[in-house]
Image (cartoon, coloured by chain):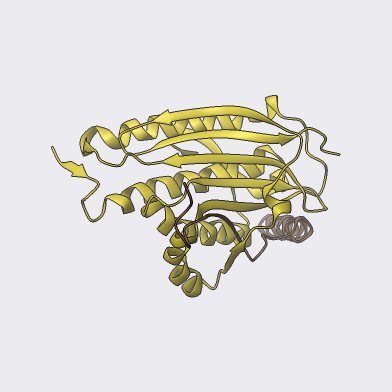
Chain colours: A yellow, B brown
Amino acid sequence: MTTLTRQDLNFGQVVADILCEFLEVAIHLILYVREVYPSGIFQKKKKYNVPVQMSCHPELNQYIQDTLHCVKPLIEKNDAEKVAVVIMDKEHHPVERFVFEISQPPLLSISSDTLLSHVEQLLRAFILKISVCDAVLNSNPPGCSFTVLVHTREAATRNMEKVQVIKDFPWIVADEQEVHMPDSRLIPLKTMTSDIVKMQLYVEERAQKT
Amino acid sequence: WAEPAGDQKTVLMPCRTPPSLDSVRLWLEARKQYQLLQRAREEA
């Protein structure tokens, strides 16, 4: 039985790989469930042993991959406090925000044998919650778009800089307009606690969407 | 407690935007046409 500690060189990478793979599936599913893009571009696939809808639009898929490629170094260093998928109306005002609040235990000792299957189980529950979240949310106005926000610290952004240049995918500080959503209600969707990561997902929904 | 200099919280977003809904709709329409054409060719 292998025991990993946070001091191991690749531990942060393992956590970042697991989370980014999960976030990729979650973003595709959110875009499908919240009808940001037509359902025709999505295909049913199996992830975490459950059916999910994944886009087959090459440009959109590349965009999501590039976004997460830049976020990964922050997660690796435990510098991404929140990753939010923000759905915006035609005027670029947020109507919904799916917030993944991430925290990693500072010190731990885990068994790799049980780790993956346990984490997969927990992530599956998140996927299932996202796939039925439309039942508790109001419809979005037509013509919505989306963006991804990362809540981090100024010093941590240095971890992103190299990747930004390599991928030619620059990031900027978000405007108050993109971050702030007045008169919103908060809907908790799921919380998980595992040996490697704690995560909670909630949706902030604007009271008046139209 | 004051934040250490240069270590304040910040919110980042990609400078680029994802593909627009219109461009995705166009792509989907073109894909459907292509698939119809292929099916017709196979039947012929």
The x and y percentages for residue A143 are 81, 49
Image quarter in which the C terminus of chain A is found: top right
Q: For this rendering, which residue is in front, A93 or B1? A: B1
* Above/below status of A107 relative to A165: above
Which quadrant would residue A163 be assigned to in this image? bottom left
Residue at the far front: name it: B1
Residue at the far left: name it: A1
Residue at the far top: name it: A135
* Above/below status of A67 relative to A99: below
Can I make out residue A184 in this image? yes
Q: Which residue is pictured at 77% across the width and 53% down the height?
A: A92
Left or right side of A46 for A96: right
The x and y percentages for residue A71 are 48, 56
Which quadrant would residue A197 be assigned to in this image? top left
The x and y percentages for residue B35 are 69, 56
Can I make out residue A132 in this image? no
Q: For this rendering, which residue is in front, A103 or A58? A: A103
Q: Which residue is pictured at 57% across the width and 40% down the height?
A: A99
The x and y percentages for residue A142 are 83, 45
Total count of labels: 0
Which quadrant would residue B11 be assigned to in this image? bottom right
Left or right side of A195 for A199: right
Q: Which residue is pictured at 67% across the width and 62% down the height?
A: B17
Left or right side of A127 for A3: left
Q: Which residue is pictured at 22% across the width and 39% down the height?
A: A112
Image quarter in which the N terminus of chain A is found: top left
